[in-house]
Amino acid sequence: MRSAIAYGSTKLEAGRLRYGELASNTGDLFGLFNIMGPCGIELRIMSSGTGPEADGWEHVSVSTIRRPPNWQEMNWVKDIFWDEEEITMQLHPPKSAYVNHHPYCLHIWRPLNEAIPLPPVWMVGPK
């Protein structure tokens, strides 16, 4: 997770929640942000940062008020918080482990202490 957040800290910082329970300070890697996404809809983004409370994971959740974020929006958020060459993932856990506090929220994850394996490129499609 890169520092706050190299992309365009002005746009992200302008949307940072600065008061209340989920408030954070300028430059923090964690916090809650409300910013206009690339498809013209406001995205609510929550970042866990990389401190001890992150429990070995970098995590960003992305939601809207009307629908789940689409691929373009999720990819855009990924590139704000991580370098374009870093591997991150979205997970489909077993149904017994589902937690759904918001019907239109998706998550991006990256473990801090291990590499995410990738399938062979040929299995994904022709390059």
Image: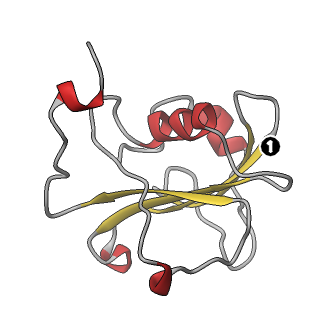
Q: Is residue 80 left or right of residue 127?
A: right
For the C terminus, the quadrant is top left
View extreme (bottom): residue: 96
**As drawn, is 27 to the left or to the right of 10?**
left
Residue 29 in the figure: left or right of residue 57: right
Residue at far right of view: 66
Nearest to the observer: residue 30 or residue 125 = 125
Which scheme is used to colour this image of the protein?
secondary structure
Against 26, residue 32 (above or below) is: below
Residue 24 picture location, percent across and down: 60, 64
Q: Residue at x 71, y 62 (%)?
A: 18
> Number of numbered discs present?
1
52 relative position to 22: left or right? left
Q: Quadrant of residue 122?
A: top left
List x then y, in percent, for residue 119: 18, 40
> Mark 1, residues whose alpha carbon is within 10 Å: few (<14), some, or many (≥20)?
some
The structure residue drawn at horizontal position 70% and vertical position 27%, both measured from the top left corner, is 38
Which amino acid type is marked by label 1? Glu
In the rendered image, residue 79, in percent from the top left (x then y), is placed at 46, 33
Based on the displayed image, in which of its 4 quarters is residue 52 positioned?
A: bottom left
The residue at the point 75 percent across, 69 percent down is 19
Q: Nearer the viewer, residue 31 or 90?
A: 90
Residue at disc 1, secondary structure: strand
State whether residue 29 is above or below residue 12: below
- Please name the residue that numbered disc 1 is placed on: 42
